[in-house]
Image (cartoon, helix red, strand yellow):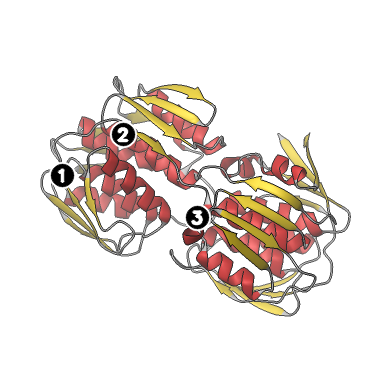
Amino acid sequence: MDKIIVEGGDPLKGEVTISGSKNAALPILSACLLTGGWHTLDNIPKLKDIWTIKEILSNLGVVFEENNQSLKVNTDNLNSHIAPYKLVKTMRASILVLGPLLSRLGKAKISLPGGCAIGARPIDLHLKGLSLMGADINLAHGYVVANADKLRGADIFFDISTVTGTENLMMAAVKADGVTTLHNAAKEPEVIDLANMLKTMGARINGAGTDTVTITGVKELHPVKYTIIPDRIEVGTFLIAAAITKGEITIKGCNENHIEAIMEKLLETGTEIKKEGEVLIVIGHDKIKSVDIKTMQFPGFPTDMQAQFMSLMSIADGWSIIRETIFENRFMHVSELRRMGADIEINGGQALVRGKTNLSGAQVMATDLRASASLVLAGLVAKGRTEISRVYHLDRGYQDLDLKLSLLGSKIWREKQ
């Protein structure tokens, strides 16, 4: 198992290119199950979660050919409908194969998923929607067992907006009989990217990116060539890396429409951001102003950037309030930031952060994917050496983050633990 070592104090300078979006690639890879043939996917990130979904798909009979950032996916010969616990246990997004399998094979048996322990992310909304579409759903021995001779269109209302629920039911509906309407659908860019890929395959989808998504079932789909969008959370992480180190980073491969809420809050801190097409130039300044944030569904401030922003606020001038409204257990990084000298108090679903002049290096432990990034960011500015253990969380969602930071001038490296 690796640990990451950071010696802080160096302002970051240089250029970095953003990798493909993990949260877009996972449902798009799952969508390849909907029809046979060779799909070609470009800008696939090299991540632990991508490896996991490829293992799940391989177990179903999918064949892969890889070439740099392109991935060819052959789904001609599905020989299983089962996603076993040993593969699914590390990643909640594994449930995304449920809708496509049910659509194509009429049956699926998926282990209840695992993943980061950041709070309850129940799949009951997925199952309720599939039941309304005519699927017979049973839970037995830790598995979801689903069967359907033919899915049919339905009106589905989500009690709460759910990204994976929207994606799963959208995939299930593309070949269902009739029209499926998803109300209170998730509006995230990754949902739009999946819808665009499905439409390229021949699906009929309207309203992706709004509260109401309408899918009219078609008889056939065809394999496609498709390019994954850039990872907006990686963009946000490098925005904060420039701000927290008072450096200057040129970030290539951005879609600013995906990160408007993050940029707005960073501008409020006094960070300078220049836009040049798909390139952002980010300049940090000596004085970082304290800013309050509240996590919300897109287009609000993303929960996946809360921990990283908290690291920035730990050295800001004044007090800030960080409200977490998406996951009830997403403050586990607070105790580790405190070990580095951060002054943070938790009161229910909010954190009160008093900025300090300095953080100090310490031995800390990553508790989830985004928490691990927040500790790396804190380590970049802390005095002395920071050792971050359990960085396998980081590798689930960031491609070569430590390497990219080292190329920007950070003293950061890996060691075997």
Secondary structure of the residue carrying numbered label 1: loop
- What element does badge 3 sit on? loop
Label drawn at residue 255: 3
State the residue lying farthest toward the left. 178
Could you tell me how far apart the alpha carbons at marks 1 and 3 are, in whole angstroms?
31 Å
Provide the residue designation for mark 1: 217
Would you say 57 lies left or right of 413 here?
A: left
| Nearer-the-camera pick, 206 or 23 | 206
Nearer the observer, 41 or 392: 41
Judged left or right of residue 113, residue 75 is left
Label 2 Cα crowd, 10 Å radius (few <14 / some 14-19 / many 20+)? many
Q: Quadrant of residue 306?
A: bottom right
Q: Is any atom of residue 150 visible in this view?
A: yes
Of the numbered discs 1 and 2, the one sitting upstream in the chain is 2
Residue under the point 35% across and 46% down: 194
Q: Which mark is residue 150?
A: none
Q: Is residue 285 above or below residue 116?
A: below
Cα–Cα gap, marks 1 and 2: 23 Å
Asked if residue 335 can be seen in this view, the reply is no
Q: Position of residue 46 (x, y in %)?
A: 56, 34
Point out residue 314 in the picture as x, y percentages from the top left corner: 73, 68
Front residue of 43 and 9: 43
Q: x, y (%) of residue 320?
A: 66, 77
Q: Residue at x 63, y 72 (%)?
A: 267
Q: Amino acid at mark 1?
A: Gly
Residue lying at 29% horizontally and 40% vertically, measured from the top left: 200
Q: Foreground mark, 1 or 2?
A: 1
Dot 3 or dot 2, earlier in sequence? 2
Viewer-nearest of discs 1 and 3: 3
Amino acid at dot 2:
Lys
Determine the residue positioned at 71% across, 63% down.
283
